[in-house]
Image (cartoon, rainbow, N blue to C red):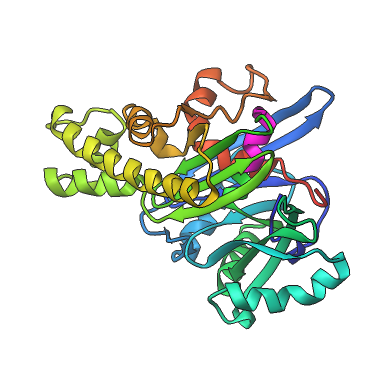
Amino acid sequence: MVSLKSLFMGTKDVVGLDIGTNYVKLLEVEESKGGYRMKNFGMAALPKDTVVNGSILNHDAMVNTISQIISNLKIKSKNTVVSVSGHPVIIKKITMPLTTDDELESSIKFEAEQYIPFDLEEVNVDFQVLNVTEEKADQMNVMLVAAKKVMIDEYTRVLSDAGMKPVILDVDVFALENAFEVSYQLEEDKSAALVDIGASTININIIRGGTSAFTRDIFLGGNYITEEIQKQLGISFEEAEALKTGRSIEGAVQGESEDIIRKGCDNIASEIHKTLDFFSSTAYENIDKLYLSGGCAKITILKDIIEEKTNVSTELIDCFKNIKYDEGEFDAEYIQDISPHASVVVGLALRRLGD
């Protein structure tokens, strides 16, 4: 699994914290003989524009929200795994001559300069060797990841001010993959697209044989649909959000928003289709299955629209499938309801230093 793991040091026990555009989600799991068990879970809404394109713009609001979740759940562990995405994060799969780890460490900066569109002084760079290429035994595939230092500093400062200690910085698309691998098994010769549709970003990770083959962030999400409803019906953002997710509001007819929602879902599906089509045309292989997650995945018609547009069998991912929990502590209906929101935070909570 790729992460910017070398940025921080810490101990083994961690708390996963997913900082999204609309929500903060916290999850703590512990390993047991039978696998994993949920220890704590919580999520809280953020004030609008606290996070824009992955950057934290309202530091105090973020600190207060995280602090409130920690207090409510009585979290004891301070060690936190957090992830980033958006414009300040670059992911590139590159091919390099087969070399030793030491030689790779010394040459990776030179390689990064060719692929990273930022001054290397502005970013932290990490990498993961994926495999030896099938075509040439003397070459290997390497996943290169870079994140702007200013973004890392934002997240670090927020966590520190909230009383937490950042120990691993991951990337959303790889956290998504981590969550998937705990709950599902993909045949060696099959490809799957993991698609997480959040409020402002669609994270796509196409995996094959247990390895990430292609990633892309699309800067479109559920807020786009909410804002269209808000604009066309002349209502508040909160009322539009309610209509989008199937709830009723006083003085508005649910049917008034249905066409807007359908058009918005169609636009999102079209962008996903373009990405899958690009992968298929360059990798010369089709996608066998699409697994959908993210808050936007709760829009009932979206799954079917994506399936029709992409012509790929699509299902909602169940990221809690192999994570046990005490039904006396956690309401099963609630866990099922929030499951689409939780793929990234599950992937983060499952991380351990050194994995």
Q: Residue at x 69, y 52 (%)?
A: 80
Q: Position of residue 106 (x, y in %)?
A: 81, 76
Give the magenta range: 177-185
Q: Is residue 314 left or right of residue 180?
A: left
Q: Position of residue 247 (x, y in %)?
A: 28, 28
The residue closer to the viewer here, 150 or 165, is: 150
**Residue 349 magenta-drawn?**
no
The residue closer to the viewer here, 258 or 211, is: 211
Q: Residue at x 28, y 28 (%)?
A: 246
Q: Is residue 292 above or below residue 176?
A: above
Type of secondary structure dominating the magenta stretch: helix
Q: Is residue 292 visible?
A: yes
Q: Which quadrant of the structure image shows residue 233?
A: top left
Q: Position of residue 295 (x, y in %)?
A: 43, 38
Q: Position of residue 115 (x, y in %)?
A: 59, 72
The residue closer to the viewer here, 99 or 70, is: 99
Q: Is residue 26 visible?
A: no
Q: Is residue 286 above or below residue 109?
A: above
Q: Residue at x 37, y 59 (%)?
A: 49
